[in-house]
Image (tube, rainbow, N blue to C red):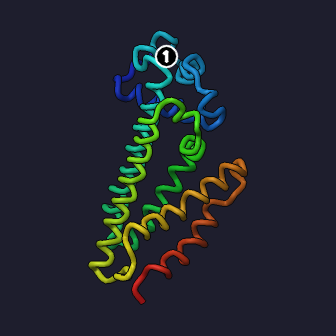
Amino acid sequence: MSIIKLGTEVRREQIAQAALALIASQGVNGLNMMGLARRVGLGASSLYRHFASKDQVLDAVIDLLRERLLGNLVIAVQEATNPLEQLRRLLALHMRLILEYQALPRLFFSGDLYAGRPERKEKLYGIVKTYLGEVSAIIRKGQEENSIRLDLDPAAVAVVFLGLIQPTAILWHLSDGEFNVGKQVEQAWPIFIEAIRVR
């Protein structure tokens, strides 16, 4: 057992991150409370003080991913000076998130995560819809500033933007990390920008 006592929120986040690591290596079905307790350095009873079940852990994992995804939007908007640069920064942050949390592709496409839990599937869909809505807002701002073509539907462009990320993440996951994410992003970005920017 760990001698260092952490605050409840810090410990819950630590547990959610450990759960993500286990999901990355063993899948959603491979996640169990005993293995998770060992990974975090807690006794099982201590883990159950934070989460009563595997379902609660999975819900915390989804909350952590939501926080990170939407947090990346805030960072991109704050750090970049114009909508095109904000999109570029967001793409880099999103790819870093996938590399950091290798379970993301496995989690989003796992039927085990949703089995008997339609509300969980709905929650994930809501996160993606919120993300796309925020990306659409960046695109609309680019249209207002005349840097992104006015004839394009912001919602459609947001989905295309997400399309830069998801297939790359899937290929990276399926290749066990062999697929070169950085190279793919560098090659895909100019194609995307050329399609949307005002010439």
Above or below, 172 against 197 in this view is: above
- Image quarter where the C terminus lies is bottom left
- Residue type at mark 1: give it: Ser
Note whether 184 is above or below 59 in the view shown: below
Q: Quadrant of residue 111?
A: top right
Give the residue displayed 39% in from the left and 55% down from the top.
Answer: 131
**Count of numbered labels shown in the rendering:** 1
Query: Left or right: 167 with respect to 178?
Result: left
> Where residue 16 appears, x then y in whole percent?
47, 31
Residue shown at the point (50%, 23%) measured from the top left: 54
Secondary structure under tag 1 reads loop
Name the quadrant containing residue 120: top left
Q: Position of residue 82 (x, y in %)?
A: 33, 73
Q: Residue furthest bottom?
A: 199
Q: Is residue 172 left or right of residue 60?
A: right
Seen as rendered, the residue at the extreme left is: 144
Extreme top residue here?
45
| The quarter of the displayed image where residue 60 is located | top left
Residue 99 in picture, x, y percent from top left: 57, 49
The reply to whether residue 159 is in sight is: yes
Which percent across, then down, holds residue 160? 49, 67
Q: Residue at x 40, y 71 (%)?
A: 85
Q: Is residue 101 visible?
A: no
Q: Residue at x 40, y 44 (%)?
A: 66
Few, some or many residues within 10 Å of mark 1 (<14, 14–19, 20+): few
Q: Which residue is mark 1?
A: 2
Q: Say left or right for 18 vs 9.
A: right
Relative to 99, is 110 above or below? above
